[in-house]
Amino acid sequence: MYFSDLPGQETTKTQLTDLFKSNKVPHALLLTGLEGCGHLQLALSFSGLLLCENPNETDSCKNCSSCKMFEKFQHPDLHFSFPIHLSKTEHSEISDDQRASFIEILKDFKCLGKKTWYSKMGNENKQGVIGVKESQSILNKLNLKSFFGGRKLLIMWMPELMNVQAANKLLKLIEEPPQETYFIFISNDQSKILPTINSRLQNISVPKMIDTEIATFLKTNFQLDSALAEKIAINSNGNLNKAICAHLESGSSELNRSLFVNWMRLCYSRNIADTIDWVNEFSKIGREQIKDFISYALEMYRQCILGNFKLSMKGLNESEESFLEKFKPFVNHKNISEINSVMNEAYYHLERNANPKILMLDVSLQLYKLLRK
């Protein structure tokens, strides 16, 4: 991944290359933004630039031995740290235990989201963690000499999932790293990073990608035709990872549509027995998939409001458009604010490990009333 491989984000690219050209690269850099904004690609591109043997002013040379190793994520001075499902029995205690899977998904998706990664590890309900053994592993690796005698880099994806013990162990290393050692942190939510870590990082905020940039990325990397790429991009709401998943995991989108249609019919009919059955089955799909479904439902409600005001409902497939044409009168100016509040609150509680069955039954009962307004 090089800067030239990511469409757009020119302001952030300029910020990073200016740091490089002025020889003022901070030893601990944080790229923060919403999931799918391209901050992971930017971190990888910047790492390639720092490791390149013959860099130009705006990108890596792409031809030196360092670049060739970097393209395959095999450069010995490039290290990764990321949240994993901790398990002694499955020999999953540090990032290196899951490195092969992490690299595989990076190559396949060319982007990464928490749901996709947890699914790859095999349990979407279990929260990933960057633990204390991972910190010890980082200390061991970065205190060794560079393999090629140049820079050493650690890319840490989602530092907000680092626990307190792990953070405390890394504080001194982050503040005073060995010579030519750099940390690049990539966060979806800077507010959740432990203050002791956050205060030691130089932050660059990365904005959302625009639809045309996402469409270009899809056409270039996944050989989609223009019409399909643009349709997926419009529906992604600036989230490149969501757009890629919509293409590679099309079954997930159809699952969300089917679940939403059935749920709304149950909520409108106020069929409590069938709603309980629906909630019981729904809660089995995994926490990250449930969060994805809530985001999907919020988007469907937004599309209803657009339709009610005679505005174009973009990014919908034929079956979604057919259902919303009939359903949109029940989501209107009288209830949309409360519906949004209920769904956003559900997402908030789900992130804090609320019981999905209890949570979604409560949401359903609230929608019983709201959809009749």
Image: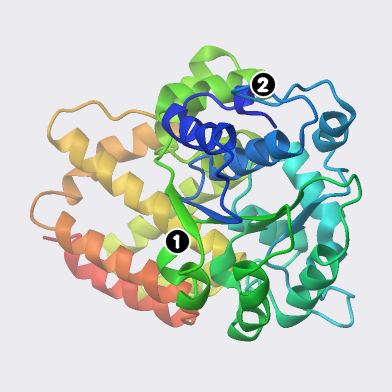
Q: Which of marks 1 and 2 is nearer the N terminus?
A: 2
* Structural crowding at the residue carrying mark 2, measured as other residues with C-alpha within 10 Å and reported as few (<14), some (14–19) or many (≥20): few
**Quarter assignment of residue 238:** top left
* Quadrant the C terminus occupies: bottom left
Q: Is residue 165 visible?
A: yes
In the depicted structure, whether residue 93 falls above or below residue 13: below
- Residue farthest to the top? 226
Q: Mark 2 highlights which residue?
A: 56
What amino acid does circle 2 point to? Asn
Residue ID at (60%, 65%): 285
Question: How many numbered callouts?
Answer: 2
Residue ID at (31%, 64%): 344
What amino acid does circle 1 point to? Asp
x, y (%) of residue 281?
Answer: 56, 69
Drawn side of residue 186 relative to residue 140, left or right: left
**Quarter assignment of residue 345:** bottom left
Q: 366 or 119: which is nearer to us?
A: 119
Drawn side of residue 171 relative to residue 81, left or right: left
Element type where label 1 sits in the image: loop
Q: 103 or 46: which is nearer to us?
A: 46
Q: How far apart are marks 1 and 2 (CA)?
A: 32 Å
x, y (%) of residue 216?
Answer: 53, 19
x, y (%) of residue 134?
Answer: 76, 74
**Quarter assignment of residue 163:** bottom right
x, y (%) of residue 179?
Answer: 73, 57
Q: Can residue 356 be seen in this view?
A: no
Residue 165: image tag: none
Residue 189: image tag: 1
* Quadrant the N terminus occupies: top right
Drawn side of residue 215 relative to residue 341, left or right: right
Residue ID at (35%, 33%): 322
* Structural crowding at the residue carrying mark 1, measured as other residues with C-alpha within 10 Å and reported as few (<14), some (14–19) or many (≥20): some
